[in-house]
Image (spheres, rainbow, N blue to C red):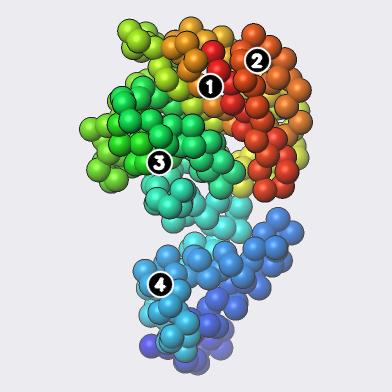
Amino acid sequence: MSRSSLEGTATPAMTLREAAVEAAARLSGDSYLRADARRDAEHLLLHALGITRAQFLANPARPLETKEESLFRQSIDRRLKHEPIQYITGLQEFYGLTFRVTPAVLIPRPETELLVEAVLARFKAHTGPLRIADIGTGSGAIAIALARHLPHAEITALDLSPQALAVAESNAREHSLAHRIRFVESDLLAQPITHHQGFDAIVSNPPYVALTDLPELHPQVRDYEPAMALFAGATGLDVYRRLIPQAHEVLRPGGLLALEIGHHQRESIAALLAAWSAVTFLNDLQQIPRVTLAEK
């Protein structure tokens, strides 16, 4: 294959290595993208060509076909507009599983795996039936990860967005767990979903970004991810103020409330949980309080 230069003369087709280097240089010109330019360029190249990293490393001198080069350039153009890689590829890894993501759902973050780990640790020795509700399920990442590792659990996944629920249901089918998860359109716990025995756990990664923080957000978050899944009023606490008392109503005695929280929210969340028992906070890898656990 060959490509034409500006002078009209035929030039050799770009190789995989050359394409990755050129794309990384383009991404490096953007201050928001510079730090991950090389990684992002390679990731998008592998996606556009449908190859693995091992295949890329084994044959970096392979020339790109015209269609491959076009697809790759389109992906880089989208990234230069700060569109998240996950929306370009349509995929994101979470807790060892691959999830389909669209602009209708928040992109699952590694930090949220701490929330999943905390719930699994709580119930790892539990042998009887479990009733767990995931509030604001989005892509279904939390609900599906819990269902995969807690085979006795009955999961109810709720979200206000029907588009998000469609993505979550698709992911559940992909992982052969749709029969274990009930999907409900609901504004938090507004729908009457209470089991007659109560839930054993309420789990949520709710919106917790303060509206005042909007100008400081990375453009890929601010301009692309759903605002409904990000923002919770002036202080970021509006959803917690509604969800915590609702969770208290539907949990069984001794039931677990597990929440992801934002930066600098520990003291405010502790105050909202003043009537609860065994309130604890777990730090993420940056030693920031990221998860709070409480018992009814």
Quadrant containing the C terminus in the rendered view: top right
Q: How far apart, in angstroms, are the residues tagged by discs 3 and 1?
A: 17 Å
Q: Earlier in the sequence, mark 3 or mark 2?
A: 3
Q: Residues within 10 Å of mark 2 (few under 14, many from 20)?
A: many
Q: Earlier in the sequence, mark 3 or mark 1?
A: 3
Q: Earlier in the sequence, mark 4 or mark 1?
A: 4
Q: Residue 145 carries which label?
A: 3
Q: Which of 95 and 167 is in front in this view?
A: 95
Q: In which quarter of the image is residue 212?
A: top right
Q: Which of marks 3 and 4 is nearer the N terminus?
A: 4
In this rendering, position of residue 285 left or right of residue 91: right
Residue to which mark 1 is pinned:
257
Q: Which of 263 and 131 is in front in this view?
A: 131
Q: How far apart, in angstroms, are the residues tagged by discs 1 and 2?
A: 10 Å
Which amino acid type is marked by label 3?
A: Ala
Residue to which mark 2 is pinned:
273
Identify whether 34 is placed above or below 163. below
Q: Which of 97 and 71 is in front in this view?
A: 97
Q: How far apart, in angstroms, are the residues tagged by discs 3 and 2?
A: 26 Å
Q: How far apart, in angstroms, are the residues tagged by discs 3 and 4?
A: 25 Å
Residue to which mark 4 is pinned:
52
Residue visible at 74% across and 59% down in the picture: 31
Residues at circles 1 and 2 in contact by the CB criterion of under 8 Å: yes
Secondary structure of the residue carrying numbered label 1 = strand
Q: How far apart, in angstroms, are the residues tagged by discs 4 and 1?
A: 40 Å
Quadrant containing the N terminus in the rendered view: bottom left
Which amino acid type is marked by label 1?
A: Leu
Q: Quadrant of residue 230?
A: top right
Secondary structure of the residue carrying numbered label 4 = loop
Identify whether 271 is placed above or below 32. above
Q: Residue 205: horizontal and vertical position, in percent?
A: 54, 31
- Mark 4 vs mark 1, foreground winner is 1
